[in-house]
């Protein structure tokens, strides 16, 4: 009984050194042979490894930004809307600017087209020999015609 307790203490110390990363090559080989001997040994090793990893995490718990992690989870689940990226914000801004500028430009273009759309009227005037004539054109211009024009 004492031999088994001594063997357990010995293998426990090898497991600790192995998990710490300070086990020698011979100790690592001995541990691997011990694990392969039975399913019970394998179970004991994995239980100790789980305990070791929970007590010695690979990251510092104080370095975790809880608020940032919570915000990331809320954004991934859709509870909190995501902030748009720079390109999306830039495009949204310029689309608004373009919309604001488009209305006055459209109004000016409509006014220009409607105001410059004059119907061209062909007016033919003629005078006989020895006669003069005058008339007012549709745009308000007075025209005098001399004889034989």
Image: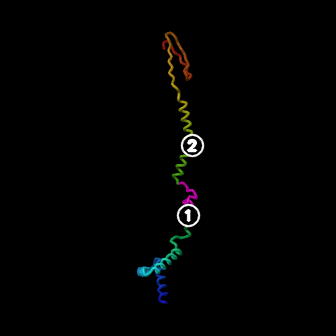
Mark closer to the observer (2, 1): 1
Q: Is residue 25 magenta?
A: no
The answer to whether residue 24 shows anywhere in this view is no
Mark 2 and mark 1: Cα distance apart in space: 39 Å
Residue 112 occupies quadrant: top right
Give the residue at the far top of this rendering: 130
Residue at 58% of width from left, 59% of height from top?
79
At mark 2, the secondary structure is helix
Query: What x and y, as percent, mark residue 51?
Result: 52, 76
Q: Which mark is residue 100?
A: 2
Residue at 53% of width from left, 70% of height from top?
60
Query: Which of 143 and 41 lies nearest the eye of the viewer?
Result: 41
Query: What x and y, as percent, mark residue 117?
Result: 53, 29
Query: What x and y, as percent, mark residue 122?
Result: 50, 21
At mark 1, the secondary structure is helix
Q: Residues within 10 Å of mark 1 (few under 14, many from 20)?
A: few
Q: Is residue 72 magenta?
A: yes
Query: Which of 49 and 100 lies nearest the eye of the viewer?
Result: 49
Q: Is residue 82 above or below residue 139?
A: below
Query: Magenta residues?
Result: 71-84
Query: Which of 66 and 145 lies nearest the eye of the viewer?
Result: 66
Q: How is the image coloured?
A: rainbow
- The residue carrying mark 1 is 69
The answer to whether residue 118 shows anywhere in this view is yes
Q: Residues within 10 Å of mark 2 (few under 14, many from 20)?
A: few
Query: What x and y, as percent, mark residue 36?
Result: 42, 79
């Amino acid at each position: 009984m004492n031999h088994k307790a001594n063997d357990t203490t010995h293998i426990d110390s090898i497991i600790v050194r192995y998990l710490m990363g300070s086990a020698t090559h011979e100790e690592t080989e001995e541990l691997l042979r011990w694990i392969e001997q039975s399913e019970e040994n394998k179970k004991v090793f994995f239980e100790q490894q789980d305990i070791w990893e929970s007590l010695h995490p690979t990251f510092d718990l104080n370095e975790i930004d809880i608020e940032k992690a919570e915000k990331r989870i809320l954004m991934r689940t859709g509870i909190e809307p995501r902030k748009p990226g720079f390109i999306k914000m830039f495009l949204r801004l310029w689309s608004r600017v373009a919309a604001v500028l488009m209305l006055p430009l459209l109004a000016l273009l409509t006014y220009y087209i409607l105001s410059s759309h004059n119907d061209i009227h062909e007016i033919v005037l003629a005078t006989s020999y020895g006669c003069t004539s005058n008339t007012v054109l549709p745009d308000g211009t007075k025209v005098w015609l001399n004889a034989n024009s």
